[in-house]
Image (cartoon, helix red, strand yellow):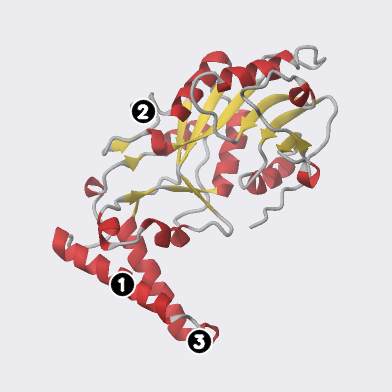
Amino acid sequence: MQVKIPSTERNDDHVDLLVLGAGWTSTFLVPILKHENIKYAATTTDGRYDTIRFRFDPKSNDAGPFEGLPYAKTTLITFPLRGEGQAKHLVHMYESTHQTSSIRHSRPRFIQLGATSIWTAPTWQDDSSPYEHADPRAIAEDELMACSDGAVLNLAGLYGGLRQPRDWVDRVVKSKADMKGKGALHVVHGEDVARAIVALHQNFTPGKRWLLSDMHVYDWWDLIQDWATQTLRDIETNSEAVGTSAAKVERQKELLAWVGELMVEEGVRALPRDTSSLGRTLDGRGFWRRMGIWPVQGRIR
């Protein structure tokens, strides 16, 4: 799928927000930046859609790519940094090429987008919970916060637009055993990610790692049962679905059967299951409470 990235606002002197790596998230972020009159610039690896051409090479000391970037109050890093050295190198290269800016009155700030997978304990987790310090992405995130005015937004599963959780089922549940192992699902919509980025830009929290979700804990079994039922109903009532393959119909019936069988086998009386039986569950209230805003997208369907 080709993602259309709105054109970058060019400014030879400075911008408020620089997006390093304008991809899927930017399709939600740029409209909000425009609405809020926040000056921005964005990069892609090939400069498409009038963005700035930029590719971060953690092994290169060539200042050229960084010299082509504007000074920004906040720089958003959307691509993952891993292990020791990458965050420090990016910060050094950017700061060393933007020391003479006439508008510079403070050290540049950095926001790194990360993942909630660094929290692994099978209990309730929030932004203050212990995480996997040896995780390569966590190492880079910690380094970013140590060597700069940096903050991290660790994101739950991203969805929105054509990216929908129901389309993940065939990839993650290939057998009844796969389904048995599925507990909680945590997600956050692209629009709420964009709102969170803007909120953090405007109310910056240096040295803080945040956990970002839509504040729901979803039960995979409950979702799969609902989605399979909806799909079968749509096939039965939609005349345009006459050509639907028999395999797709059988797949939905198979999923429904697996859910029912597992409920009996595991002694689950009703769905959704209690959070105590779902393994790792994420408490995403902290960031929204601190920023004074709340998710607007509601539950996934």
Pointer 2 local density, CA inside 10 Å: few below 14, some 14–19, many at least 20: some
Pointer 1 local density, CA inside 10 Å: few below 14, some 14–19, many at least 20: some
Return the disc, 3 or 2, that comes first in the chain's sequence: 2
Q: Distance between the residues labelled 1 and 3?
A: 20 Å
Return the disc, 1 or 3, that comes first in the chain's sequence: 3
Where residue 225 sits: x, y (%)?
A: 33, 67
Q: Is residue 174 left or right of residue 297?
A: left
Q: Is mark 3 on a helix, strand or loop?
A: loop
Where residue 230 sits: x, y (%)?
A: 41, 73
Q: Distance between the residues labelled 3 and 2?
A: 49 Å
Q: Is mark 2 on a helix, strand or loop?
A: loop
Is residue 38 shown to the viewer in this render?
Answer: no
Who's the residue at 53% across and 39% down the image? 293
Who's the residue at 41% across and 28% down the image? 135
Who's the residue at 40% across and 67% down the image? 227
Please, which residue is most extreme toward the right here? 12
Q: Name the residue under label 2.
A: 132
Asked if labels 2 and 3 touch by Cβ distance under 8 angstroms, the answer is no
Where residue 299 sits: x, y (%)?
A: 44, 56
Q: Mark 3 points at which residue?
A: 242
Count of number-bearing discs: 3
At label 3, the amino acid type is: Val
Is residue 271 shown to the viewer in this render?
Answer: yes
Residue closer to the observer: 137 or 214: 137
Q: What element carries label 1?
A: helix
Q: Quadrant of the N terminus?
A: bottom right
Where residue 69 sits: x, y (%)?
A: 77, 27
Is 92 situated above or below 202? above
Q: Mark 1 points at which residue?
A: 254
Q: In this view, does 72 lie to the left or right of 169?
A: right
